[in-house]
Amino acid sequence: MDPGKSGDFRLSIQHSSGAGRTVTIAEFDLGVINYEVKSAKCHELSLVAPPHDRISFNFRCEQEAQGWATVLMSSLGEAQRVAPLGYGPQDPLDGHDTQETSALQRTEETCRELTSAIEAGDVQSASDFAATLARQQAALRIQPSVRDYEDSDISLAVVVEDSSSSCCVTMKVFPHMTTAALKQQVRL
């Protein structure tokens, strides 16, 4: 927020060089942007008014992405909260865009609550949040977190038999393996 312009919230994307110089790449009024979490490490910023430009952010890790989203979403919420009060030169959004932004924020909050319920093992709450998202026809992509299964393996017993013989093989597999990878490992 620019201290000289009360209620004027802006996002400035900058590049810092090793020599200590900072160059502004883009600057946006927070009142006219949408922010969408596409995946755990990919987020997208778009303008709600023409030219509807989009910027995709690909983060190195989920924690960095989540931190960025938390800061930006709270800033967007604050910018939208003060926008109707008439502070500063705001481009008012029409009712449809405001409703879309509000619906998007509710959907994102429900997604966060669903994630928390799943992580906590709360089946009833997770079911309720999933049902809410289904009613909203929200497109979801469920992707297990790598940290949940990095160090774990499963012993899988495979029995192969025909009319004259049988063989039992025990393999070490990982929870994140695909069916195709399992089939390939069995063939070896």
Image (cartoon, rainbow, N blue to C red):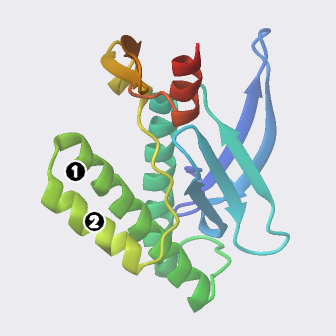
Q: Residue at x 62, y 42 (%)?
A: 42
- Label 1, residues with CA under 10 Å away: few <14, some 14-19, many ≥20: some
Real-space CA distance between mark 2 and mark 1, rounded to the nearest whole angstrom? 8 Å
User: Residue extending furthest bottom?
Assistant: 95
| Residue 68: % across, % down | 51, 39
Note whether 134 is above or below 17 in the view shown. Answer: below
Nearer-N-terminus badge (2/1)? 1
Note whether 164 is above or below 110 in the view shown. Answer: above
Q: Where is residue 123, by image quadrant?
A: bottom left
Left or right: 103, with 148 as reference point: right
Q: Nearer the viewer, residue 116 or 137?
A: 137
Query: Which numbered circle lies on residue 117?
Result: 1
Q: Nearer the viewer, residue 175 or 50?
A: 175
Which amino acid is tagged 2?
A: Phe
User: Can the viewer see residue 82 in this picture?
Assistant: no
User: Can the viewer see residue 106 in this picture?
Assistant: yes
Q: Residue at x 33, y 26 (%)?
A: 148
| Residue 4: % across, % down | 59, 53
| Residue 159: % across, % down | 36, 22
